[in-house]
Image (tube, helix red, strand yellow):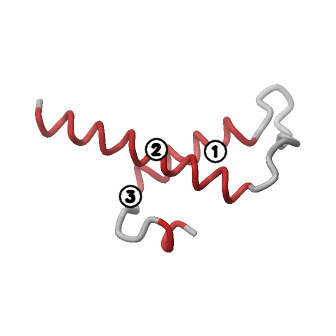
């Protein structure tokens, strides 16, 4: 999914950030069980990756212009 949707935009740092975001969105932190409200885990990870990519780009831009 990542190679199709984010071709040429795969970065190891972004994948790690997206995994953290996905975990907080898809897993109940009290019980460690998957949240029943997550019907499409791939869709949730897609959204998490898009958010992480935007955050990473902003950080790169900030570091470049600092």
Given contact means CB atoms under 8 Å apart, are the residues at marks 2 and 1 in contact? no
Q: Where 14 sits versus 28, above or below?
A: below
Q: CA distance from mark 2 to mark 3?
A: 10 Å
34 with respect to 54 (left or right): right
SS assignment at label 3: loop
Farthest left residue?
65
Q: Which mark is residue 2?
A: none
Given contact means CB atoms under 8 Å apart, are the residues at marks 2 and 3 in contact? no
Residue closest to the eye, 25 or 13: 25
SS assignment at label 1: helix
Picture coordinates of residue 21 (x, y %)? 58, 40
- Image quadrant where residue 27 sits: top right
Q: Earlier in the sequence, mark 2 or mark 1?
A: 1
Q: Quadrant where the N terminus lies? A: bottom right
Name the residue that disc number 1 marks.
22
Q: For mark 1, does the 10 Å Cα neighbourhood hold few (<14), some (14 to 19), or many (20 or more) residues? A: many
Name the residue that disc number 2 marks.
52
Mark 2 or mark 3, whichever is nearer to me: 2
Residue at 86%, 31% (x, y): give it.
Answer: 31
Residue at 48%, 72% (x, y): give it.
Answer: 3
Name the residue that disc number 3 marks.
11
Farthest top residue?
30
Given contact means CB atoms under 8 Å apart, are the residues at marks 1 and 3 in contact? no
65 with respect to 38 (left or right): left
Q: Earlier in the sequence, mark 2 or mark 3?
A: 3
Residue at 49%, 53% (x, y): give it.
Answer: 15
Residue at 79%, 47% (x, y): give it.
Answer: 38
Q: Quadrant where the C terminus lies? A: top left
Picture coordinates of residue 43 (x, y %)? 67, 56
């Amino acid at each position: 999914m990542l190679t199709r949707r984010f071709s040429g935009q795969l970065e190891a740092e972004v994948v790690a950030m997206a995994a953290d975001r996905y975990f907080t969105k898809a897993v109940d932190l009290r019980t460690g069980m998957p949240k029943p409200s997550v019907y499409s885990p791939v869709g949730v990870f897609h959204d998490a990756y898009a958010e992480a990519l935007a955050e990473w780009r902003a950080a790169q831009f900030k570091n470049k212009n600092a």
